[in-house]
Image (cartoon, grey):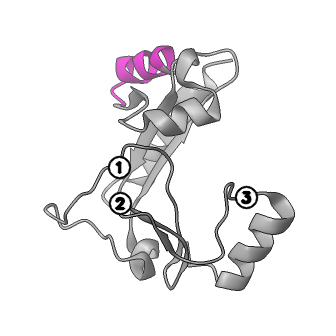
Amino acid sequence: MSIKSDRWIRRMAQEHDMINPYSEKQVSAGVISYGVSSYGYDLRVGSVFKIFTNVNSEIVDPKRFSDRCSTISFRLPNHKPIDIARHLGDRGIFTWDGNYYALNLTERLGVEEKGGLLRVGIVHYNTADEIARLLTALRELK
């Protein structure tokens, strides 16, 4: 993943409504700033903000996001995330279901009342065989 240029962000916001509401400049209402910045777009997604520090050696520098390991969230048609998590757990694959403290996001996506999302973390020490096991177990759900 790379940082997108201000020009790309502006075009996507204006032509595809990618960010709504959109602010061309940094705005600070005394709490959290938002708008186009040197790091991309600072986005305010709700009235509650989680501010964190780098206590776990997490990569938080936007210029190094490509160094991070993948965490993905998704839904499968005709399956509740909790049922998928149980199915995978029965096969020794541990995942999470719900909103992961991102309630505003799951509500905005319209999935909160449907059980949220399934979250899978794939990290640098996972083997290709483990990922293949995950995909095989997901294919079992039809």
Q: Quadrant of the C terminus?
A: top right
The reply to whether the C-beta atoms of the residues labelled 2 and 3 are less than 8 Å apart is no
Report the front residue among 135 and 22. Answer: 22
Give whichever of discs 2 and 1 has the lower sequence position. 2
Give whichever of discs 2 and 3 has the lower sequence position. 3
Tag 1's secondary structure?
Answer: loop
Residue where numbered disc 2 is placed: 31
Q: Position of residue 141 (x, y in %)?
A: 62, 19
Q: Residue furthest front?
A: 29
Residue where numbered disc 3 is placed: 18
Q: Amino acid at mark 2?
A: Val
Q: Position of residue 27 (x, y in %)?
A: 51, 71
Q: Position of residue 50 (x, y in %)?
A: 30, 50
| Residue occupying image coordinates x 61% and y 16% | 79
Q: Residue furthest right?
A: 15
The residue carrying pointer 1 sits among few (fewer than 14), some (14 to 19) or many (20 or more) residues within 10 Å by Cα, namely few
The reply to whether the C-beta atoms of the residues labelled 2 and 1 are less than 8 Å apart is yes
Vertical arrangement, residue 17 with respect to residue 60, above or below = above
| Residue occupying image coordinates x 33% and y 26% | 92
Tag 3's secondary structure?
Answer: loop
* Residue 43 in the figure: left or right of residue 60: right
* Residue 34 in the figure: left or right of residue 19: left
Vertical arrangement, residue 56 with respect to residue 45, above or below = below
Q: Position of residue 31 (x, y in %)?
A: 35, 60
Residue where numbered disc 1 is placed: 49
Magenta segment: 82-93
Residue 13 position by quadrant: bottom right
| Residue occupying image coordinates x 35% and y 49% | 49
The residue carrying pointer 2 sits among few (fewer than 14), some (14 to 19) or many (20 or more) residues within 10 Å by Cα, namely few
Tag 2's secondary structure?
Answer: loop
Report the front residue among 57 and 121. Answer: 57
